[in-house]
Image: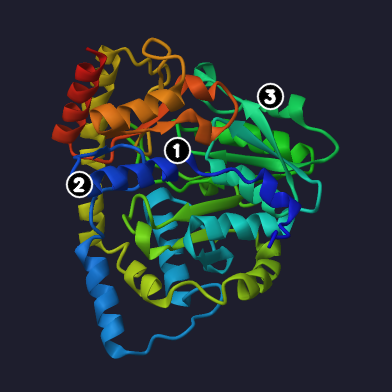
Amino acid sequence: MTPHLARRTADIQPFHVMELLRRARELEAQGRDIIHMEVGEPDFATPQPMIDAATRFLAGGDVHYTAALGLPQLREAIARFYHERFGADVAPERIIVTPGASGALMLALAATTDPGDEWLLPDPGYPSNRHLVRSFEGVPRALPVGAATRYQPTPDQVADAWTARTRGLIVASPSNPTGTLLDQAELAALRATVIARQGTLIVDEIYQGLTYGVEASTVLKSMDDVFVVNSFSKYFGMTGWRLGWLVAPQAYVREIEKLAQHFFISPSTPAQHAALAAFAPATIEILEARRNEFALRRDTLLPALRELGFVVAAEPQGAFYIYADIARLADDSEALAHRLIEEAGVAATPGLDFGDNQPRRHLRIAYTNRCERLLEAAERIARMRG
């Protein structure tokens, strides 16, 4: 039987990092030791206060749907977190709890995108963004960015790329794969450029909280007419719980609620009850200690990579990735990634996942492993090079 596939599926590319992860698991099943630096997942366990909160809830057995927008008390807790941590006043009514940050971006795009609408996205950038745009019949348009602008778009670049079909701009701070940030002035300038053209700005703050040498912030501190996507996965260490949130301008909330009702019914109820403990002082103490550990890992891995010949022209200030130029080591990052996993037992992600802007010249290397393993990975690479 020949399947009848929707035409859009032809434009959805595989996630190369998952292919590498599958190969890593195969090698591990054969007894090989693989140092994982490919997947964007913290290696820490979910903090115990959140596990305890979920356990208490589950013990009661009352596990049913919540409202489509999420538990009211969790929406209020997120709003308090914005106020206490960042000095941003965000009404709980604007916060939609979602099945992961992907669910949040889906809702934002579904509520704003008509067929043929163009969205501007930095390249390199997180791959799912462009594929979700396509899934809602939009058209992703790449903005090539480089180290000179810390892999972030500029207002002039956005203005030059804007057409009559452009719907909006998606940016990330901290970004994946580069770990670079946009400060408040840069975000304000991008917003002004977009709003002047009656467009929409979506800001990905999924790695908010994971910043090094600079205080974490939010675009919501000074703007309330943008969409913000966030997650409990990265800073809060809840990847497998699949919980995120969207902050939407008030005028969009009712329409987004209808979409959420049909897309998801509601977010995971146990995950939401676990997340109620995410903002407790005991949990934040654990998370801040982990942030300090990530900073140490970054400061350990950066010089080791440079000594091997990797070029890191824009140092990461957030997330847990280093986007490295491999031109001194190889001609093709995909071939290098496969050689690393097969010969050195080191898994890293080729630039192919992140767009069309010199992807074969770059690797994304995640420092989601303890320092001794990162140094061991560097030693293995050095031995592989001979």
User: Could you say where residue 347 lies in the image, as x and y percent from the top left?
Assistant: 32, 35
In the rendered image, the quadrant that contains the C terminus is top left
- Give the amino acid type for the residue marked by disc 1 in the picture: Pro
In this rendering, position of residue 279 left or right of residue 131? left
In this rendering, position of residue 257 left or right of residue 296? right
Q: Does label 3 or label 2 sit earlier along the sequence?
A: 3
Q: Does label 3 or label 1 sit earlier along the sequence?
A: 3
User: Could you say where residue 74 lies in the image, as x and y percent from the top left?
Assistant: 42, 71
User: Could you say where residue 96 lies in the image, as x and y percent from the top left?
Assistant: 55, 66
| Cα–Cα gap, marks 2 and 1 | 19 Å
Provide the residue designation for mark 2: 289
Q: Quadrant of residue 53?
A: bottom left
* C-beta proximity under 8 Å, tags 2 and 1: no
- Give the amino acid type for the residue marked by disc 2 in the picture: Ala
User: Could you say where residue 344 lies in the image, as x and y percent from the top left?
Assistant: 24, 28
Provide the residue designation for mark 3: 157
Q: Residues within 10 Å of mark 2 (few under 14, many from 20)?
A: few
Residue plotted at (42% across, 49% down):
86
Which type of secondary structure does the marked residue at label 2 adopt?
helix
Residue plotted at (20% across, 40% down):
32
In this rendering, position of residue 326 left or right of residue 48? right
Q: Does label 2 or label 1 sit earlier along the sequence?
A: 1
Q: Residues within 10 Å of mark 1 (few under 14, many from 20)?
A: many
Quick check: can you spot residue 316? no
Q: Quadrant of residue 300?
A: top left
- Give the amino acid type for the residue marked by disc 3 in the picture: Gln
Provide the residue designation for mark 1: 174
Q: Residues within 10 Å of mark 3 (few under 14, many from 20)?
A: some
